[in-house]
Amino acid sequence: MIELRQIHKAFNAGRENEFRALNGIDLQLPAQRVTAFRGPSGSGKTTLLSIIGCLARPTSGRVRLHERDISGLPERFLTEIRRRTFGFVFQQFNLISGLSATENVMLPAYPLGGDRHALRARAEHLLAGLRLAHRRTTRVELLSGGEQQRVAIARALINEPPVIIADEPTANLDTALAREFMAIIEQLADAGRTVLLSSHDPLLVDSSLVDRVIDMRDGRIVAAAAPAGDGG
Amino acid sequence: MNVWIEKQKYLIDFTLASLARRKAKNLGLLLVYSLIVFLLASVMLFTHALRQAANELLAGAPEVILQRMVAGRHDLIPPGYLERIGRLRGVQEKQGRLWGYYYDPVVKANYTFMVADDRLLAPGTLVVGAGLARTRGVAPGNLISFRAYSGKLFTFSIADILPAKSELVSADLVLLGEADFRAFFDIPPGHYTDITLRVANPLEVRNVAGKLAQQFPDSRPILREEILRTYESIFSWREGIVLALATLAVLAFAILAWEKASGLSADERREIGILKAIGWETGDVLRMKLWEGALLSLSAFLLGYLAAYVHVFHFAASLLAPVLKGWAVLYPRFELSPVIDGLQVTTLFFFTVFPYAAATLVPIWRVAITDPDAVMRG
């Protein structure tokens, strides 16, 4: 479903402080699987997720989504693909403070201009599904860390994207909240969504939830395997 | 189309929420912005209304005035001039006028004494302008004394006060009978201050003036349109000075707006990054910011213009009057009739809203094109 060929990404290319974040990544990511990218910080996990999720373009190489080459598309089309295909859960949650939980969840759908009542109902339904119905009108900065992450997950789901990308999702959560997050991800995977995670949290990466772990270092894939617990 | 409207509604919704979230900052900006519009609009509304008032008042003035000159100075018309004019084609009526200035040391003000041509005043009575009546504290029936230039004291009784409607030109006016005027200023019979001529056809006015100039080489004809033009240029000059100062204010405001937009807070930059990451296009962010600018500009424009309207037409432009009306001891008090000129409103709109939009657009665009992956990396 997602295919990467010879992906290179350099920051500040051609300058003294040039930094090569990715060095020739070749990868195929099947649909409806949970894939985790593991590696130390600076290994290129986040950059790779950004490129897969159309947040950034590779310096060279090809990204194919459903057999279609999307690496050379102009920003408008990339945004459209991002909006319809990917939902993001960021490490810092990145909610907009001052707005309520429901408003935050609705935000990605604003540029689509759909029916307001239907959109609000969908947002509230998602929040209720994540046990946040009672917090839907609360301003997000007043929510706890776990609640904020669940709002971020609801926001990622509002446009019903087939792929969820979560960058270091458990980095700011304690064990109980991390397990709660994993339970939600499991539900999403069971519902047929593709999930891409970056993490070096063993609790997450080594869990049975993850179908495939890809180890990265210095912008390269060093190994790809099913988690140890699955025996292969 | 529906989708487009819905989308704009969402953007406006978000914009309003954004504005409300940074209340203090945006209210401050709105206040300064409204103040600028208020200042510019007050000047424009006031001078426009003054011009209109002057035009209306001078509409009844004679088309041509003939003044005699001696050594380049205005002098009395000697006897015989009025008769010598004879019959000029196009002239409907000619009349000798008597008027002069009088300095009243009591209130340190200059009055205009004039013989009333449209009302008969009994000897020893006066009609005075509302400004003078106010300054001297007189009412109809009161007595008022003036010492003539000859040193002789004259006492008059006030017959009436001129209506406040004409105060712009009659604040300092004293109307009296011909005999009283001649006695007070010691002007012998047959002499006049100037001669007025009424010409019905506007195309004839210049011909009449030409003939007069030829016939009386020692006199100068003054046309009503020239007086109007003089008023026009006085008001335009004053308006120009204030507007020139106001331009500096607009410039300062544009710098402030630029500062505000280019110094988008870290919070705002982060927000724009988030919006882009979750699927907003650069265009959506720009549109949202344009709505923000438009809402702010329009509110400021409406607030400022409304305040200026109330200031000019309900409070007689009390803040600007000393600069724009001129200075005088006998300050005219008058109500201006509200006049709103479409072109003027458009000009004002362009000069206030456009600089703001232009000053904020570039810095906002620079932030809006930020790579959405900045959020992931940040």
Image (cartoon, coloured by chain):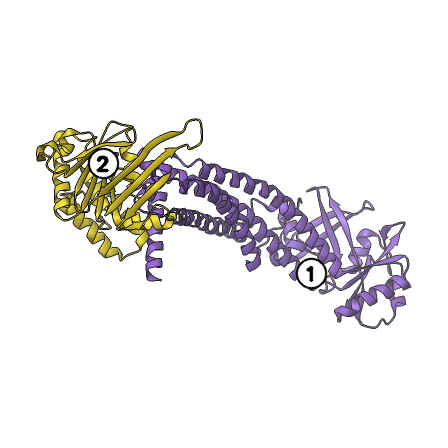
Chain colours: A yellow, B purple
Q: Secondary structure at mark 2?
A: helix
- The reply, left or right, for residue B112 in relation to residue B2 is right
Q: Secondary structure at mark 1?
A: helix
**What residue did someone put label 1 on?**
B58
**What residue did someone put label 2 on?**
A142
- The reply, left or right, for residue B365 in relation to residue B108 is left
Q: Is residue A202 above or below residue A192?
A: above
Name which residue type carries label 2.
Answer: Leu
Name which residue type carries label 1.
Answer: Leu
Can the viewer see residue B149?
yes
Q: Nearer the viewer, residue B212 or B5?
A: B5
- The reply, left or right, for residue B369 in relation to residue B223 is left
Residue B206: percent from left, percent from top: 80, 65
- Asked which quadrant contains residue A207, the reply is top left
Of the 4 image quadrants, the one containing the C terminus of chain A is: top left
Q: Nearer the viewer, residue B38 or B300?
A: B300
